[in-house]
Image (spheres, helix red, strand yellow):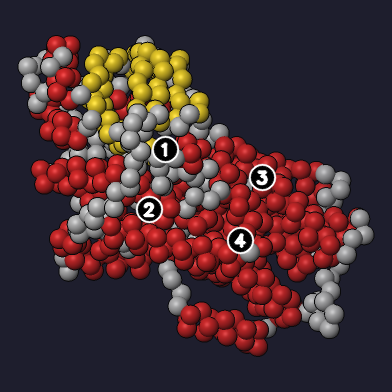
């Protein structure tokens, strides 16, 4: 859900004037509601945008509030010094809570983070320093010269300004490189890694963001209520927060805010009916999950898509696939080039099955190498070992002169290896342009500190990336689909998007896993031209393919696998005449496999 500048301005003016119409109780409600909206935005960033289930958000909130309380009342620090320390403490907690995300995912992560949240509530209820069940009172009023923050009306403006700043920052993250990479990780962590996204750092970043929002929320809350007690950070409140994010639409931060305001108001309305309160907002959450799984924020896009569908627009997109414009070839040095890829004695076993058995091959720079073999002969497994998805049981892989055995995929991607997948792995909730943008972005996630210290450099870089993405889309004839989700495109077009995305990484070695599968004759011919042109820019291509016409035409050398072993290697003509190859395919012609294994 995009807010235009105009509507943002109206909302801002409305928010600024709001206290004039509210009594002292209502302003209190609004203040707490804004704190919850801030927490919801943080949760949305981690869970909705980054895909990391985080049920410890309420504990982050608690750490921020309690740290402020303890530091101001026990250590004699002023409010603002305590506030900074509290946010730092929460960020450290965030990194701690995020570490399980490096090992476990989805519901397991939910259980682990929930456990940590429970541990926190348990600790504050029992620890002497946290005041036990009574909590800590007498937190001093934060002071700003000339402003009396003990008035909730004026405190409102403090919360509002911090909230607005952090919301805008969150939106900035979501709409630029870091957010795109987080969304890519959410959609398909494996493909994101293969495109160079350092997934572990990215996961920690998601938790770091969530914790900072939680910590700031806690500080604001401590200064507002000036009293902290365990029940504010209970699991019931965690589920309230979760409800806010689910109702609003977890992928949209504005949606999270809308969900937070909506659900908080429902809770206020039901405050005199505690019997029904939990059931009340519980049913709201269930209704939304059933009837609008993408939340309130997901409704407008779904409506637009539905209308476009009704008008038959989606179907007609296929006609607008443009022609691929060949790259201008680069001069290649003559003579024997060094081998860019060397696979040496690689074996890989899956329980009883030897998927790869002592496989060796070398690919010289600038070659188009075909890998063929019957289904199940280990071709994809070989790619998975080369690109770092699988660890080989034995053997080494050398790439561009380095031993890269067991290197994680994102490091191989950074070193210049790029691949496509046999069963397309496009990021489904990103547009075609964003899919390409993720690949074009070659920065490391740790450089995201720039978001805080040099936001303008982020804006400039994003503009540059977008320009380059448009060039890529134009070259591959995909401009008409730039803003569409890949799933809405015909299969052949999706395959092309995946190749464009893989080449956008600027690899020196490109691995294509059955790129012609599912394409029609004309598309296969175009694919051949495309691959040749990609090679002419100096990229070495290794291509797994069942379409023998394409392989014979395109590849300079072919390696044949059968039952995990290399049974032949040579020029297309010599390989086709090798008796072992003919036998492996149980036929007398190289055409057979495409019929046997469609
Ligand atoms: P190809 O790509 O040549 O069709 P694969 O490399 O996908 O073959 O598979 C080779 C063999 O290894 C198959 O028998 C397949 O079932 C098995 N295999 C591949 N990946 C796994 C896995 N992750 N776990 C268990 N078995 C696997
Ligand atoms: Mg395969």
Residue 39: image x %, image y %?
A: 61, 60
Residue drawn at 85 percent across, 55 percent down = 70
Query: Compared to 564, does 460 lie above or below?
Result: below
**Pointer 3 or 4: first along the chain:** 3
Q: Name the residue under label 1.
A: 417
From the viewer's perspective, tell me whether residue 553 is left or right of residue 100.
left
Q: Residue 109 appears in which quarter of the rendering? A: top right
* Cα–Cα span, label 2 and label 1: 17 Å
Q: Which of 414 and 56 is in front in this view?
A: 414
Q: Is mark 3 on a helix, strand or loop?
A: helix
Q: What element carries label 4?
A: helix
Q: In which quarter of the image is the N terminus?
A: bottom left
Mark whose residue sits in front, 3 or 1: 1
Q: Which of 403 and 318 is in front in this view?
A: 403
Query: Compared to 581, does 482 lie above or below?
Result: below
* Cα–Cα span, label 2 and label 4: 21 Å
**Pointer 2 or 4: first along the chain:** 2
Q: Which mark is residue 152?
A: none
* Cα–Cα span, label 3 and label 4: 18 Å
* Circles 2, 4 touching at the beta carbon (< 8 Å): no
Q: Mark 3 points at which residue?
A: 95
Q: Residue 451 carries which label?
A: 4
Residue drawn at 70 percent across, 51 percent down = 91
């Amino acid at each position: 859900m995009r807010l235009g500048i105009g509507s943002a301005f109206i909302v801002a003016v409305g928010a600024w004037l709001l206290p004039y119409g509210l009594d002292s109780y209502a302003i209190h409600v609004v203040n707490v509601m804004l704190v919850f909206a801030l927490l919801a935005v943080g949760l949305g960033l981690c869970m909705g945008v980054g895909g990391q289930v985080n049920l410890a958000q309420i504990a982050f909130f608690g750490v921020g509030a309690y740290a402020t309380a303890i530091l101001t009342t026990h250590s004699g620090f002023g409010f603002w010094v305590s506030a900074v320390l509290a946010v730092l403490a929460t960020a450290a907690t965030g990194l701690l809570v995020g570490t399980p995300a490096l090992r476990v995912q989805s519901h397991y992560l939910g259980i682990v983070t929930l456990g940590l949240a429970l541990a926190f509530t348990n600790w504050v209820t029992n620890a002497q320093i946290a005041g036990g069940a009574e909590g800590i009172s007498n937190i001093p009023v934060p002071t700003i010269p000339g402003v009396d923050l003990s008035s909730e009306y004026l405190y409102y403006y403090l919360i509002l300004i911090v909230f607005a700043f952090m919301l805008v920052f969150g939106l900035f993250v979501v709409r630029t490189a870091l957010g795109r990479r987080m969304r890519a990780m959410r959609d398909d962590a494996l493909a994101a890694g293969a495109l160079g996204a350092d997934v572990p750092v990215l996961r920690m970043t998601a938790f770091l963001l969530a914790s900072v929002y939680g910590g700031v929320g806690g500080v604001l809350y401590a200064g507002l209520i000036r009293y902290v007690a365990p029940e504010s950070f209970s699991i019931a409140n965690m589920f309230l927060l979760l409800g806010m994010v689910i109702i609003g639409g977890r992928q949209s931060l504005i949606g999270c805010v809308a969900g937070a305001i909506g659900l908080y108001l429902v809770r206020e309305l039901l405050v005199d009916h505690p019997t029904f309160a939990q059931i009340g907002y519980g049913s709201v959450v269930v209704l939304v999950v059933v009837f609008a799984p993408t939340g309130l924020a997901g409704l407008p896009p779904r409506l637009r898509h539905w209308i476009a569908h009704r008008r038959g627009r989606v179907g007609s997109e296929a006609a607008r696939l443009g022609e691929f414009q060949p790259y201008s070839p680069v001069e290649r040095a003559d003579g024997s080039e060094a081998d860019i890829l060397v696979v040496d004695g690689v074996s890989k076993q899956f329980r009883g099955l030897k998927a790869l058995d002592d496989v060796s091959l070398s690919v010289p720079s600038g070659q188009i190498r075909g890998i063929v073999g019957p289904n199940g002969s280990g071709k994809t497994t070989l790619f998975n070992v080369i690109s770092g998805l699988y660890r080989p049981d034995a053997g080494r892989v050398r790439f561009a002169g380095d031993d890269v055995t067991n290197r994680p995929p994102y490091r191989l991607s950074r070193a210049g290896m790029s691949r496509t997948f046999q069963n397309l792995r496009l990021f489904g909730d990103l547009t075609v342009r964003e899919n390409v943008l993720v690949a074009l972005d070659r920065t490391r996630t740790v450089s995201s500190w720039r978001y805080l210290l040099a936001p303008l450099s982020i804006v400039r870089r994003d503009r540059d990336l977008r320009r380059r993405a448009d060039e890529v889309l134009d070259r591959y004839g995909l401009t008409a689909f730039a803003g569409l989700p890949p799933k809405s495109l015909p299969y052949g077009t999706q395959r092309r998007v995946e190749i464009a995305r893989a080449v956008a990484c600027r690899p020196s070695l490109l691995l294509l896993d059955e790129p012609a599968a599912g394409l029609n004759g004309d598309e296969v011919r175009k694919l051949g031209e495309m691959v040749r042109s990609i090679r002419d820019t100096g990229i070495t291509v290794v291509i797994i393919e069942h379409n023998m016409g394409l392989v014979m035409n395109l590849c300079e050398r072919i390696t044949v696998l059968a039952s995990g072993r290399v049974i032949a290697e040579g020029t297309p003509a010599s390989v086709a005449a090798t008796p072992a190859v003919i036998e492996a395919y149980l036929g007398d012609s190289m055409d057979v496999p495409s019929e046997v294994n469609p």
